[in-house]
Image: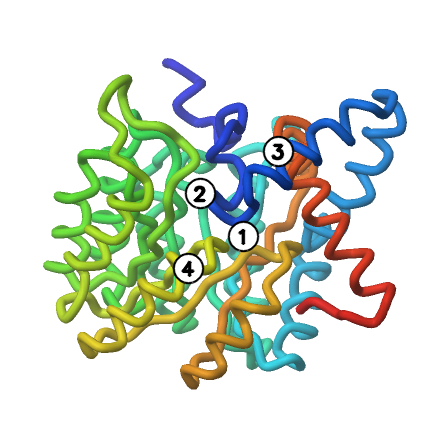
Amino acid sequence: MDQSRFSTSPPAPGTSGAPAGAVRSSFAQRAIRAVQSRSSRCVSAVLYRIARDFVGGESLDDALKVAQRMDGNELNSTLGFWDAPSYTVNDIAAIYYRAVEGSASSGLDTYISIKPPALHFDLKRARELAHFAMENRVRLHCDSHGADVAEDTFDFIKAMMEVMDPELIGVTIPCRWQRSVSDTEFAIEHQLNVRLVKGEWPDSPGQDRDLQVGFMETVEQLSGRARHVAVASHDIDLALAAVKQLSESGTSCELELLHGFPMTELIHSARELNMRPRIYVPFGRGYMPHALRVFKTNPHLALWLGKDRLSRLFGKPSA
């Protein structure tokens, strides 16, 4: 069996590893030159410090504390466990069960993001976990991975649907894939919750859709038809255009942002729209290596985040 099918580690990040469009190219070029001028050891130390702020902790308890702090700032959350090779499938399943229990007892507006590859797309586990979440009335959301395993992910979701109300099931739609048009139709037909992203994993060579165009085409497809849409992008103009169109069509929607990224402007804009943003809180030993890979491949992103941290020190706090 091809074990690579079960990897949850994103591809080496390039232009898609950062919130696309969030950083102007001129700033990116300056950042690249600045980072390249430092020694590798110094850069790694700085990136590690930034990446540490980017993670919701190693344990579920750590992540729940972050979610509770978010709730105190009138922010909803979703908890996303990132596995590592040291975790077994049984370990990962146990963490998902504990996350459901913790979410149910927390009183927070939160849900659990799961990774079907980490459970080896096991349909029996899908039904059992969905049944447990259904009993606790906790929403489960299937994160997206490579286009080559998308069909396996939807088979996993179909197994969940056998025992769980659609209102408690979510799926991520990467707008860059050609197949996402039909996947979006499936989500609409079955009234699943949708998280719309540009996508980290590319489509087959030559098949990628334009990120901006594909995103708004999918928004158009969802408008007036979807149960609920989480617009997951730090691209300010794109995110606001998406929620505006969805809202005007009468579609339930929210902004979903990644913990650790600067988000003050997006949060302010969401609140002007009487919308309470949601924060994706990653936790687990698997996330720090991913965050470091992102920052090392995208030094402009690391500098962007570092600039945000400095702004906090000088009295301009970011959410």
Q: Earlier in the sequence, mark 3 or mark 4?
A: 4
Query: Residue 149, labelled with which disc?
Result: none
Amino acid carrying mark 4 in the image: Asp
Q: Which residue is mark 3?
A: 294
Q: CA distance from mark 1 to mark 3?
A: 17 Å
Q: Earlier in the sequence, mark 1 or mark 2?
A: 1
Query: Residue 80, labelled with which disc?
Result: 1
Task: Tell which of 304 and 18 is nearer to you.
Answer: 304
Q: Residues within 10 Å of mark 4 (few under 14, many from 20)?
A: few
Q: Nearer the viewer, mark 1 or mark 4?
A: 4
Q: Percent x, y for residue 222?
A: 18, 61
Q: Percent x, y for residue 162?
A: 20, 56
Q: Which residue is mark 2?
A: 115
| Quarter of the image where the N terminus is located | top left
Task: Tell which of 62 and 101 is nearer to you.
Answer: 62
Residue name at image x 60 percent, y 38 percent? 26
Q: Residue furthest front?
A: 26
For label 2, the SS is loop
Residue name at image x 56 percent, y 60 percent? 99
